[in-house]
Image (cartoon, rainbow, N blue to C red):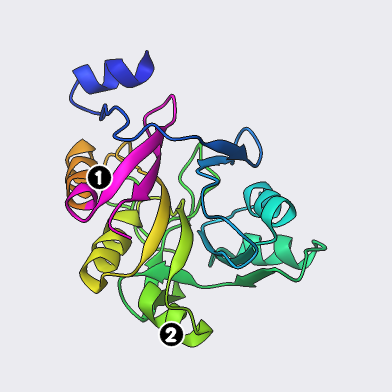
Amino acid sequence: MRAIARWLQGKGVLYTRDLYRPVEWHGSERCGWAISPEGVTGDSIVYSLGIGDDVSFDLSLIERYGVRVYAFDPTPETAEWIARQSLPGRFRYQPVAISDKDGTVDFFAPVPGSKCSTLQARIPGQTPSHRVAARRLRSVMRELGHDRIDILKMDIEGAEYDVLQDLLEERIPVRQLLVEFHHRFPTIGARKTKEAVRLLRAHGFRISWISATCNEYSFWNISN
């Protein structure tokens, strides 16, 4: 109901699924995602952008299918948390931000009421706290020797729009895309999510799952 109310106010988005295919849930209630099990094997490559202090989604996929997970998150607290964990060999972590540019990017400390640092200002006038290392998807794939991504998960606090634009322009082969859109941020708004979904559909991505909040989406690429 809250998603519908925000849509009626012009502050949210409201979509229905384009495809009806079996999905299964992986991870915790708070940080899990719905994927299609079709074609997921031990050879599958998973990129997990933005992990915070919850890798239940990644570990569930590794346990169920034996996939290889490559996780990226530049947050210092995440790097410290990862260092304290005992993680399987098929989980690899890099403390870098995935962006639409190589180099360094501004990083913003959490605003009151949030514990998430961001690459985008969450409120007007917010100033960055420091800079972090950033890599484009294509650059990371080249370094890791990958020519495709079977499952790409993005929870990167507003930076998804630039990364998606770069992904589409580079025509990076992605089978499944899981993304949380952050149009609820005052500095972003619903228009950017609508444009992102339009571009994804134009490039062959179809919505296969939507969360109750209409913020999280799973897409299946019918062009692959």
Res 108 quadrant in image: bottom left
Q: Quadrant of the C terminus?
A: bottom left
Instruction: Magenta stretch: give its range.
Output: 200-224
Q: Quadrant of the N terminus?
A: top left
Up/down of 126 relative to 105, above or below = above
Query: Are the residues tagged 1 and 2 within 8 Å (C-beta)?
Result: no
Front tag of 1 and 2? 2
Looking at the image, can residue 137 be seen? yes
Which residue lies at the image location 36% right of the left edge and 81% below the top edge?
102
Name the side, left or right, on which 192 lies relative to 18. left
**Farthest residue, direction front:** 39
User: Of 142 and 73, which appears nearest the observer?
Assistant: 142
Up/down of 217 relative to 71, above or below = above
Which amino acid type corresponds to the residue marked 2 in the rendered image? Arg
Name the side, left or right, on which 11 lies relative to 175. left
Real-space Cα separation, disc 1 to disc 2, in angstroms: 31 Å
Res 111 quadrant in image: top left
Which amino acid type corresponds to the residue marked 1 in the rendered image? Ile
Q: Where is mark 2, residue-wise?
A: 142
Q: Where is mark 1, residue-wise?
A: 188
